Image (cartoon, rainbow, N blue to C red):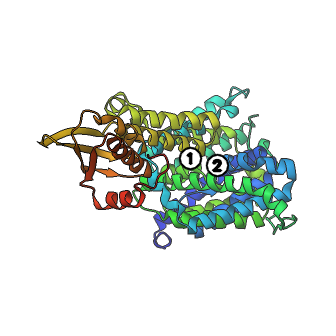
Amino acid sequence: MGALRDPRRLRTEVLAGLVVALALIPEAISFSIIAGVDPRVGLFASFTMAVSIAFLGGRPAMITAATGAIALVIAPVVREHGMDYFIATVILAGIIQVLFGVLGVAKMMRFIPRSVMVGFVNALAILIFLAQLPYLTDVPWIVYPMVAVGIAIMVYLPKLTKAVPAPLVAIVVLTTITVAFALNVPDVSDQGDLPDSLPSLFIPNVPLNLETLQIIAPYAIAMALVGLMESLMTAKLVDDVTDTYSNKTREAWGQGAANVITGFFGGMGGCAMVGQTMINVKASGARTRISTFLAGLFLLIMVVSLGEAVGKIPMAALVAVMIIVAVSTFDWHSVQRNTLRRMPKSETLVMLSTVAVTVATHNLAYGVVTGVIVAALMFVRRVAHLTEVVDVAHPDENTRVYAVRGELLWASSNDLVYQFDYAGDPQNVIIDMSDSHIWDASTVATLDAITTKYAAKGKTATIIGLNEASAERHGRLAGHLAGAH
């Protein structure tokens, strides 16, 4: 690997991994609490996920660990059925993700419009910022200037030097101030107990029968879908930030394999973390798998061997880091007046719907699905208005030629039947479809209805000009669709 032979690049990767590891600790503990499990479960999951995906994933420098979205999806399992079923759910979800990856589900990413991606990024930035508010509420007043100092360091230090990641400097400076002046402020140790031993093999004690599958399968499928969606969206985001390409199929099955490994070590599973990934890629400048691997390794070393020292890191330092990440992640260009003025209203609606649903539900997957649905409806609405029927010729007194223009699918072809003059047309009607395309059975049924209406009037309607694909679909379905006559 080129980074191993380049001291400057290697230093960047190592320091980036260290910064991410520090930021992962309170997040993993918080997500463990959301899931209703011991903090060790989230911390060990973050370690095993990061280390596994560093080797298996398709997107270098992306950070995968325990996440809030996954915690929310599978929390009911541990609450209602216990820890063994919880871990079995994680393992099954990983297996499902591997199958999805092998089946090429990652290729579906190309159906996600740019406006949904913009909404995803903006919603993520908002969620990252909102997640910091609890650490800024009902705290000693000194916390606020500490956060301000941390933000100032990260804004101005890169203008002087980029030799050391600014987030790491902010964390070290604020921790030193806290310890030196014995400041009584919230720190990492307040978030929960840190483990004092290494993770060990965990085999869930559940009966291997249909009843167990019925219990865990719905949660496992939901976890697999949410995890894949967030991971693949994050991978695409990193592609854009780094101007490089990643293997989405490998990332899909790699996420699944990492979840299976994590489950067998008693972890809660996870997926890509956009906030920590942006710390790694954007704030710290990492570009290789080394930073991902070291983030997991440093996390384990710090919480097991240096737990007491890590526990003294003030939450103000990590809040400052995450605020900078939120501000840098948000696509400010997308909300500028000139951009909104030029952008079609439908595109803006898609972006805003993605943001609104994501922020309201705190679930990126729900927001993305909503955005895709709204984008599809907007597209169908546009297509429906692009179809027309034009009276183009009268070769003789017994013949009239109509031209049908546009893309014909259920949304645009349903009104087609009302655009012909069945009573007033002559004996022979020719429907020229050279400038149109048949996309579905609904259109064929509509054409059947048109020819049937002319036949009922004792007239003949002839369809001509179909392209090869349309002719094949029409020839296969015409006259065989119930309700067409």
Q: Say what amino acid the circle numbered 2 marks.
A: Ala
Can residue 51 be seen here? no
Q: CA distance from mark 2 to mark 1?
A: 10 Å
- 2 vs 1, front mark: 2
Relative to 191, 291 lies left or right: left
Residue found 43% across the figure and 35% down from its top: 332
Q: Is residue 198 above or below residue 364?
A: below
Residue 299, by quadrant, is bottom right
Relative to 388, 311 lies left or right: right
Task: Give how far across and how far down residue 75 sits, in percent.
Answer: 77, 47
Residue found 49% across the figure and 73% down from its top: 1
For residue 23, the mark is: 2
The disc, 2 or 1, on the residue closer to the chain's N-terminal end is: 2
For residue 351, the mark is: none
**Residue with the mark numbered 1:** 167
Q: Is residue 60 above or below residue 153?
A: below
Q: Say what amino acid the circle numbered 1 marks.
A: Pro
